[in-house]
Amino acid sequence: MKLFDNKIEFGGFLMAGLVLVFVLPLLNAYVPEGSALHFSEYHIGLWGKYITWAILAMSLNLLWGYTGLLCLCQALFFALGAYAFGMYLMLHAGVDPVYNTALPDFMDFQGYTSLPWYWKPFGSGAFAIVASMVIPGLLALVFGYLAFSSRIKGVYFSILTQALTYALSLFFFMNTATIFGKSFILFGGNNGLNNFGEIFGFGVNEASTKRTVFVGSALLLLVVYLLIAWLIKTKFGMVQQAIRDSENRVRFSGYSTTNYKLLIFVGSAMIAGIAGAFYVPQVGGINANEMVPAKSLDVVVWVALGGRGTKFGPVIGAIVVSVIKSYAQVEFPNSWLIILGAIFMFVVLFMPNGLAGLPKQLAPLWARIRGNASTSATPVS
Amino acid sequence: MKKSLFVLLFTLVANLWGQDDPRVRQLLEDLALERADDQDALLDELANSGDSFVTSFVDAWRTGEVYQYAPDGSDPIIVIKVSEAYIQLSTWEELELTPSQIEEIEDNKSRPSRRLRRTLSRVTDTVDLASKDVGTRKAAALKLGQSQNQEYLEILRARLEKEENSSAAEALREAIAISLLANYSSPEELKEAIAALGEFRSIGAKSKIETIRDKALEEGDEDLAAIATQSVKYIEDHEAILRHAGSIFRGISTGSILLIVAFGLAITFGLMGIINMAHGEFVAIGGYTCYVMNQFFSEAYGTQSDAYQWFFWCSIPLSFLVAGTLGWLLEISFFRFLYKRPLESLLATWGLSMVMRQMFRLIFGAANVQVGNPEVLSGNVEFWGLAMSEARIFAIGFAGFVALLTWALLTKTNLGLFIRAVMQNRNMASSLGIPVKRVNSLTFAFGCGLAAMAGAVLSQIGNVGPEMGQAYIVQSFMVVVVGGVGNLLGAGLSALGIGVVDQILQPLIGPIMGTIAVLFIIILFLQRKPGGLFPTKSRSMED
């Protein structure tokens, strides 16, 4: 089975892989600072962040672009994965000088002397990595089962997932929760988890560690891309796209659309979760602001801008929007939200297929211009 | 012209001081000039007048705004200085004075003597007991009772014999009983008082009775302890009832706001197939309109004037107009291209919402702004001991009005008929000659206007800020979905239901867990009824 549609895509994939996995890390490691070719540590962190966001966008595209489910809780899955791995990092932050304990600061602050039972397993790195996929996956399984089995779909599904995000973000904003009279400490409330020390024995802030995590994220991006490229060519993927186009016909043909949707929902949540796990060490923290409903809407916008239902569109969308945002935030601190909002409105109205669809959209126009120049009668479609 | 202006000014000032009885003014002048033969009788008469002017006058007297003045050797008179004018107390007329006379007056400040001040405080404390207003009488009685001052016990008893209003008499009896807890003459009297307070469900006396109960338990006075325990139990039961009634009341009022917001959404979402993520920002427009009007009125008329009170009543229709116009403009330039493309509309309107929020920040600042309350909406209404804020009562009434208005618009007007026709089948309606485009614009403008009116009402209850709409948007969407999309009755019922459940859960598990629980209840509810309370009936397979 061919994974790539054409040679251009294959070449692009190889190039991106080479640049991300070899060129940029090598430029960072071996070109001296101050040289024009040096890829700085700051940029390693920044682009590492963009890459995890691109993976997040791809996971949403799997749902929205290929299955037709607009999910407004994708950033929630991402943040849950980030929290799961953040808990591991938090437990290996070392003894802090103020309280002289190995407990996270906010636990000391709340007067806790020992680790609560639900924090204990996260001391193991392997567990945390698995949990960063399993926890979002389980949530997606339960919620998806409830939603799909009662045939909630379309806009209703979007609104419900948004409500789920809203509810859970409120939960993570709390410092402690009292459930049935028992008080539980949560995950750092507003401040979230930060001030990490080491990751699998290496210092989080060391250049080599940062480079390694960057390469890891890049590899994950490539793997997820290949995975999606493979999936949509399988029979499973065909059914998936058929559901997007006409769910009822698929159901009448004897397929259990509920199971298909559930499986994709869980899978996409797990991809978002593992992307979140790679996000935390590169950004150096995670807090409840990362899971508010607006963040999930941002992801949707990345996919829409890049081109939903295309393999590389979401990656382009996530990176383009993030770069514009970084640039505008500095250049136009007062009006960058207006710029960004205007871009969203423009894209939806005038670029229904996003950036990836732009060449096709402009093709007739291009043909006309070229046609006029050569005065040949090129048919205008 | 000038004269009529003065008359106007004086009526205004007089109203402000709350005076209307010339006899009271005469008595006060006698008191200040020490002309009375029997000062005690004078004080009694003042206390029994029930005129709140006495209190304002005594305050002014103490702070030195009262002057003694003898024009050209005639009898001295008392002059009050009110906003730079000098007014004769007994006649309540302005004196026309030369600068030298003013100087003379200013030198003759009149102040009550220390002894008189002490007795006067008894008068000012008890004058409200004789007030014409029943509410003031009741509040004054309970305040005196709470002070447990022996002196006032007799006054309260004397008042009780004269009191004709039954609810005021009740308050006096309660006050007497509370006072007796400290001033009893025999153990029997104390027991009677405690039992009576239990009957009255007197929340104000609860802690005092508890103290007596604990002391009685310590001293082994079982009889007294039993009576006190019984009374405390009565009061606690009553408190529990009040708490629940309060939750339900707050729930209904929160639900009412949700209802107004959700009606707008139900129209745009249900009828036009647009998910308007910027709907919350139209709510904020209403809040800011109210803020601007508040600023404008307080600058143009001053916060003390009667005209200022009108700012809120002007801002409700204005916010409808402002948001309606904006909604109309946006419809013809933007939303028009999004019909029946809900997912795309969600994205585009999210962009619009970002733009609008940032506009608010640029114009009004990132922080929340304060909006004043008109006097009618700033107090509490007490009903069976349950204090209900007037602003919330207004919100409930207003939601009812909006519901009625929307229902009338949809069922009694031609526009409503067109709206329903377009909603059922856009193409069919168009081919039957209904101006679909204009109907769309008007419907959308109406939805936006409703949101803004909700924002105006919200400005009296909560904060007005750039993010205020965001706080309501998720819940409003839930209201629309739970009610059944496009069904206004469903939206109304689900708004009230969600509001009440939320307020009942909040005291039990905390505000945030309460909100979370409500959202999960909604998700589970949709399991049973995926189409909401009143699902749209349709023959189309896709619905």
Image (cartoon, coloured by chain):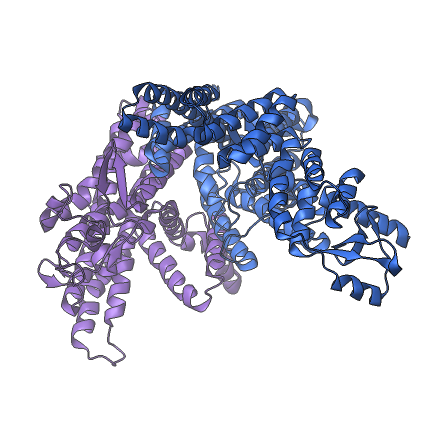
Who's the residue at 36% across and 24% down the image? B525
Between A264 and B309, which is closer to the camera in this rendering? B309
Q: Quadrant of the N terminus of chain A?
A: top left
Between A112 and B162, which is closer to the camera in this rendering? B162
Q: Is residue A243 left or right of residue A216?
A: right
Total labels drawn? 0
- Residue B322 placement (x, y as % from top left): 65, 46
State the hue of chain A: purple
Q: Is residue B507 left or right of residue B276?
A: left
Is residue A350 visible to us here?
Answer: no
- Residue B150 placement (x, y as % from top left): 51, 34
Image position of B427 with respect to A48: above or below: above
Q: Is residue A333 left or right of residue A94?
A: right
> Which chain did the image draw in blue?
B
Is residue B352 visible to us here?
Answer: yes
- Residue B327 placement (x, y as % from top left): 60, 43
- Residue A237 placement (x, y as % from top left): 25, 37
Who's the residue at 23% across and 70% down the image? A41
Q: Is residue A216 left or right of residue A7?
A: left
